[in-house]
Amino acid sequence: MPTIGLGVYLINNADECRRSVAAALRSGYRLIDTAVIYGNERAVGDALAASDVPRADVFITTKIWLHDYPYERARASIDASLERLGTDHVDLMLLHQPGPQALEAWRAMEEAVDEGRIKAIGVSNFEPEDLEPILDGARIRPTVNQIEMHPYYQRPDLVAHLRRHGIVVESWAPLGHRNKKLLAEPLLADLAAKHDCSVHQVLLRWHLQSGFVAIPKSTNPAHIASNIDVYGFELTDGDMAAIAGLDKGRPNFRIPKWVLKHLLPRVRPRQFA
Ligand SMILES: NC(=O)c1ccc[n+]([C@@H]2O[C@H](COP(=O)([O-])OP(=O)(O)OC[C@H]3O[C@@H](n4cnc5c(N)ncnc54)[C@H](OP(=O)(O)O)[C@@H]3O)[C@@H](O)[C@H]2O)c1
């Protein structure tokens, strides 16, 4: 699995999504992170088809939405994702959120793995208590948990728990989703000056050196290029320890439990492109 990918959340315009994916592939990205609920799987598939990068070289991740967790709907959701992405398999499929019927969707994903239509399966936004039924009842274990992760929300306990279970941490909102305070942290500016790079590159380097996979979103070709240009320098142990001190233990986004349980499962994914 590549360690930096392009996230396409909130890229709701099909042309813009195609252009962003194309720019990412040209800049050397080989991981694209989409989801049924983003509504842009077709645009991602079109951009992949139009590119001269072979399908086998690209790691495609998509996610099943809560509404589709009942077994039959999960099967249909997997079929529809493959059709929209224009591929016979995805490299990683995630359950987008914990939900009461998560195990049903998990079984559908396990079958798709057996059929060669999904290479690996995982979860997103799962806390240890959400993971438990999957770890207990699953035939195929989760490989990845995609979670909000940035220096203001470092989640050491969850990370340690995931590591104990051999689950890779994939960071969403790796740049803090435009959190102005985070981006203006003097420490990050100092580290950017020290390493002759941008604050965004310091952040992405922190993810890499923490052992996380990061999927920054951008529609700006210059940002897209610079976000993957992070393999030529290294933060020191001291830099990493200083960034550890920024943790506020607070997410940018917190979905109340009742919204997750009662409201989100009723939201039907809408396709923009
Ligand atoms: N599993 C989940 O529940 C979940 C939830 C949220 C997100 N995600 C995934 O994680 C991905 C990333 O998260 P995110 O989109 O919330 O936040 P993010 O990647 O932390 O931040 C994206 C913002 O940063 C800006 N940006 C990116 N690179 C930049 C650069 N080099 N210089 C200046 N600004 C830059 C982007 O604007 P420009 O476009 O102008 O560059 C955009 O506004 C999503 O696209 C999605 O794939 C998953």
Image: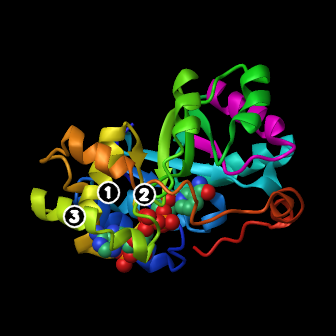
- Tell me the amino acid under the disc marked 1: Leu
> On the rendered image, what quadrant is the C terminus found in?
bottom right
Q: Return the mark for residue 226.
A: 3
x, y (%) of residue 72?
85, 43
Res. 8 in view: no
Q: Disc 1 versus disc 3: distance between alpha carbons? A: 12 Å
Residue at disc 2, CB closer than 8 Å to ligand 1: yes
Question: Could you tell me which residue is drawn at 27 percent across and 63 percent down?
Answer: 188
Which of 84/238 is in front? 238
Viewer-side label of 3, 2 = 2
Q: Secondary structure at mark 2?
A: loop
Viewer-side label of 1, 3 = 1
Res. 250 in view: yes
Q: Give the residues drawn in magenta, as a range.
A: 93-115
Q: Disc 2 versus disc 1: distance between alpha carbons? A: 7 Å
x, y (%) of residue 100?
87, 44
Question: Could you tell me which residue is drawn at 49 percent across and 39 percent down?
Answer: 169
Q: Which residue is mark 2?
A: 174
Residue at disc 3, CB closer than 8 Å to ligand 1: yes
Instruction: Evaluate if marks 2 and 1 touch, with contact meaning CB atoms under 8 Å apart.
Output: yes
Instruction: Evaluate if marks 3 and 2 touch, with contact meaning CB atoms under 8 Å apart.
Output: no
- Above/below status of 24 relative to 28: below
- Tell me the amino acid under the disc marked 2: Pro
Question: Could you tell me which residue is drawn at 34 percent across and 42 percent down?
Answer: 3
Q: Secondary structure at mark 3?
A: helix
Asked if residue 102 lies in the magenta stretch, the reply is: yes
Q: Which residue is mark 1?
A: 203
